[in-house]
Amino acid sequence: QVQLVESGGGLVQSGGSLRLSCVASGRTISGWTMAWFRQAPGEEREFVAARGWYGTTDYADSVKGRFTISRDSAKTTVYLQMNNLKPQDTAVYYCAAASRFSTTRLTYDDWGQGTQVTVSS
């Protein structure tokens, strides 16, 4: 099993920026895809962004042009740079890992505990 630990959440004003980090440890994730999902109160968990082992990326339409997903050179840490944040981005953000590239929640085997992002208007 992979352990995923997120950090970087917080409270920010509309238009501001935050950078989330997720560190993976435990079983090797060589070849794996890492992604970010989010869940707002009363809503289902939704896809935000994914980055495959060889650099393939995909984003939800709602964050395209504002969010950027990246991985460090060792590929054990994934980042989510969030710019021009909006109140509707408020949610708990979860890091996830999967053995193949996907934007579907059920594909992902391992999840972090989540980090809260709150955007005030």
Image (spheres, rainbow, N blue to C red):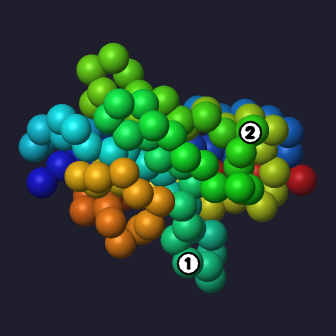
Q: Residue furthest top?
A: 73
Q: Residues within 10 Å of mark 1 (few under 14, many from 20)?
A: few
Q: Amino acid at mark 1?
A: Glu
Q: Name the residue tied to disc 1.
A: 44
Q: Residues within 10 Å of mark 2 (few under 14, many from 20)?
A: few
Residue 60 in picture, x, y percent from top left: 64, 55
Q: Examine the rendered structure and indicate whether residue 40 appears above or below residue 100.
A: below
In this view, the residue in front, 14 or 60, is 60
Q: CA–CA distance between discs 2 and 1?
A: 22 Å
54 left or right, relative to 118: left
Taking depth in this image into account, of 16 and 10 the one nearest to the observer is: 16
Quarter of the image for residue 71 reads top left
Task: Identify the secondary structure beneath mark 2.
Answer: loop
Amino acid under disc 2: Arg
- The quadrant of the rendering that contains the N terminus is bottom left
Q: What residue sits 36% from the left and 51% below the top?
A: 101
Residue designated by label 2? 66
